[in-house]
Every structure is written in structure tokens, then in C-alpha cells.
Amino acid sequence: MCLHICLSGVFIRNMRTCLVVLLLVQVSFASSAQNKWLRMQPEDWFELESVQKAWRMVKQDTGAYWSNAVFDQGWLSLVAGSEGAMFIREKDLRLVFDSAGHNLSKSHNLGFNNGAKEFFWNGRCYAVGGQGYWNYHSQLIEFVATTGEWELQHTDFAPDFIDNRSTCWDANNGRIISIDETALESEDGALVRGVYAMPMDGGWSWELKGQVNPAFSNHLSFPRLQSFDLKDFFIWVGLHKTLILRKEDMSCVLSDALNEALLNGSTGRNRRLPSSYRHTSTKNGILTRRHIFENSSENQEWSWDIAKAFEDSEGMSMPLAVPVSFRRASASDGNDDNSNMLGSLVLALMLGGVGFYLGKSRQKPRPTGAPGETASIEKDDNKATGIQNSEVGQARLSALTQEFLDLDASSLDTIQLNALLALTDDLSEETKRARRAQAIRKVNVEYELLYQQALIVRTKDKLDRRRTIYIIQRHSDSA
């Protein structure tokens, strides 16, 4: 007994120590994740002298297609194609400036548009793609100046995830051109990235142009790739070369005119000095980079004629996209159950709470009487519970789960599952995949609460690894 008490005390002390350590770690993570400049009120941040200096740099760059200033207190940019009419702050929908410096935004949204591509069309500012709120996406949002709010706009056949690294605004043709950051499985089994385009005046429907040309795959996989948007071109600056996309016909060349070392200059990519500014702009086919340091004579400026670099190498141009046929069930289909884990957790907690409530409500009051009578009643109750267990479980199952249980077959392929869930051909493959995953999660969470096992298990066809099979594994009590 003494040994048991001693071990219990040690266990409790160890648990307390672990909890304290975890609390300290969480506090340190939370404090390190905070950005004091983002915590400031947007108008107060904009009044900082360092921000005003960056604002003057970007604003005075007249005629630029795109202009950007990066400094210690943040990031300011001219919206591509706005011709000096609209400016934004990095990953902050609360700040949208006009040319006079007035903040037009009334949004309270911070963090939805990390890495989004902003552009200007038909007198309005838009942002597409990016990441935020535990989600990588390709959603299109529109800034409505009359309300000061950002509005989500529906698009069809959208890629899975895009951001400003490989998304450009073709102002001449009024369209977005983008490379999906998510690789999908083609019919020949290779994982490739799709190239998409969406005309803004064509009903906001994305069109698959093909897969990334294999000749450019290595260049586009460079981890420190830097990209810049020009009116007629879009470029990806790599370690040794720059890939130049001509937007008009989506043809590309690899050029030696610019590389990472030339772009970063003698200051280097990661060199940080007090009160430093890095100003980059694109104008008339020319990319300009300036490094500006206060109280220093190290200010530097470089320019590269991208239009001429493309012209010099045009004889070796190749298309950005080549034909592709993606497998009906995408490569990410096998990860359906792992996506949107937060939603699954919330659903499980809700179902668990309902199950607990129903369980409590079904408990019978304990009868009073002699010990022998109590034991007899408990025995009879256990027998009744065993007889009714299956019926109670069946009564709690949803119509969707019951539909799977009523199937004669023990497995389904993707086409059969689509038919069962009424997923018609007019839906995109991504939409079908998401709805299949949602249905399977809902059924499995519900079934596990009753029988401690999943009802639907996804696996690959042994004869054809490209096909997905959904196995129905019924518990003996529900078979």
C-alpha cells in the first residue's frame, strides 16, 4: 500500500511538471508568433514614419505595372495593373489605400490572404489564392469600395491551391494565369502540376491548359524561386537562370540575363540592416531593384530588360503548358480523410456530446431493495441491453449510414460511390472528391461512436493501383 501511494505521488508530480512545461512552451510559441506591427491599428501603423517613407517610394513610382517595398515594419505594394489607383499591405485585408493614402477598407480580416495574388480589373481590386485559417485555397475575393468589404466570388473548376509565386495577372487579355501548387496524378501515373487560366469576363470559370512543361519542372522546383509580374511578362528567378513567360501566348524561355545572385546584389538575400528598404518595381518590360539604407552610402540600384531578354532567346521558346489528362480520381484523393481535420474534430465532439446526453437519458434509476434483489435486476438489465443493443444502434444511425449498410455489395469503386452520393458529371473532380471525403468522414465518425470501428475503408485496387476501392466493413451487431 505504501509503495502504491509513493508511486502515485511521483506520477502526480511528474504530470504537474509536464503540464507546466507544456504551458511554458505554448506561451513561448504564442509570443514568438505575434507581430507587433500587425497588432497595431491599421491607421496607426500607416502613420509610422518608416511606413510613410515606404509609401512614398511605392506611390512615386509612376507608370509602374507593379511596385513593392519591403522593410522592417512590413510590406506595401501597388496592386498589379491598377496604374497607381490602389495599394495594399501584405496579408492584411484591413488596409486598402487609394492614391491619396485613404484607407478604403472596413474589413476586420487579418490572415486569410497570406501569399494571395492581388490584381486590378474593371475598376476593382481582387485577390486570388493564398493561405489562411488552416486552409490552402484558390478562392477569388473582390474588394467592394462602396462597402469597404471583401466579398467571396464563386468560380468553377478552380485548381486546388495557388499563390503569388506562380500566379500572374494578364491585364492585356483580362485573365489570370496560374500554376497549381498541388501536384495531381496523370493517366500515366506521374505527379504533375496543372496550368490554369481564367478570363475575368468569361463567367469566372477556370480552364485547364495542360501540365507544366517538363523542360521547366526543375527550374520551378527551386526552393528559393522569386517571381515578379510585368505587364507583358511574368518571371521566375532561379539560382542560375530566369524563366520568362510571355503572357500573350504563354510561351517561355530560359534566360541567363538574370539569376539569384544578380537579383540580390552584394547585400545578399538575407542581409538585414537597420532602417533598410528593398524596393522592386516593373515598368515597360524592365525589372528594377533598389536597396536603400538610411544614414548610409550603400544605396544600390539594378535594372534588367526582361522584354529584351525574351526577344534574344525567343528562338528557343517553348510552351509553358503541354497536354495532360489527369486521372479521374486525383492523387490527392487518397488523402481525403486527412483534409479538413478541424471539421472532423468538431463533428466528432458534437456527436460525442449527443451520444453522452442520450446515454445519460437512457439510464434507469437504480432500484432499492435487498442486495439479492439488486443483483437480480442488474442481471436482467444486462440481458435486455444485449438483446436491444443492435436495435438501439440502428435507431441512432443516420439515413446516409444506413444506406451504406443496406448495400448488397461489400465494396464500391469511385464511380459507384459518386452514383450513391448523387454526384453528377457537371460537378468538378475537386468538388466530387471533397463531397466524397465529407460523406465518408460523417459516416465513419458516427459508426465509430457505436461500434468502435470505421464503416468505410479506402484502399487501392490490387490489379490497378490507379483505382480506389471503398470497402464496407460491417460490425457483427449491424450486419
Image (spheres, rainbow, N blue to C red):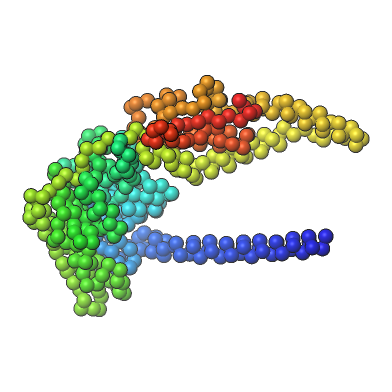
Q: Residue at x 52, y 21 (%)?
A: 408
Q: Position of residue 259 (x, y in %)?
A: 19, 62
Q: Residue at x 29, y 44 (%)?
A: 193
- Residue plotted at (66% across, 61% down): 15
Q: Nearer the viewer, residue 203 or 233?
A: 233
Q: How many marks?
A: 0
Q: Residue 110, position in %: x, y? A: 39, 53
Q: Is residue 179 left or right of residue 347?
A: left
> In the shown orientation, is residue 343 left or right of residue 65?
right
State the residue at coordinates (47%, 35%). Answer: 458
Q: Is residue 187 above or below residue 13?
A: above
180 vs 55, nearest the viewer: 180
Point out the residue furthest to the front here: 463
Inspect this view and state whether residue 337 appears. Answer: yes
* Residue at the extreme right: 370
Image quarter in which the C terminus is found: top right
Residue 181 image point, x, y percent: 32, 47
* Whether residue 276 is situated above or below residue 353 in the rendered picture: below
Q: Position of residue 373 (x, y in %)?
A: 89, 32
463 with respect to 358 (left or right): left
Question: In front: 398, or 332?
Answer: 332
Residue 432 sits in which quadrant? top left
Question: Can residue 431 be seen here?
Answer: no
User: Quarter holding the N terminus?
Assistant: bottom right
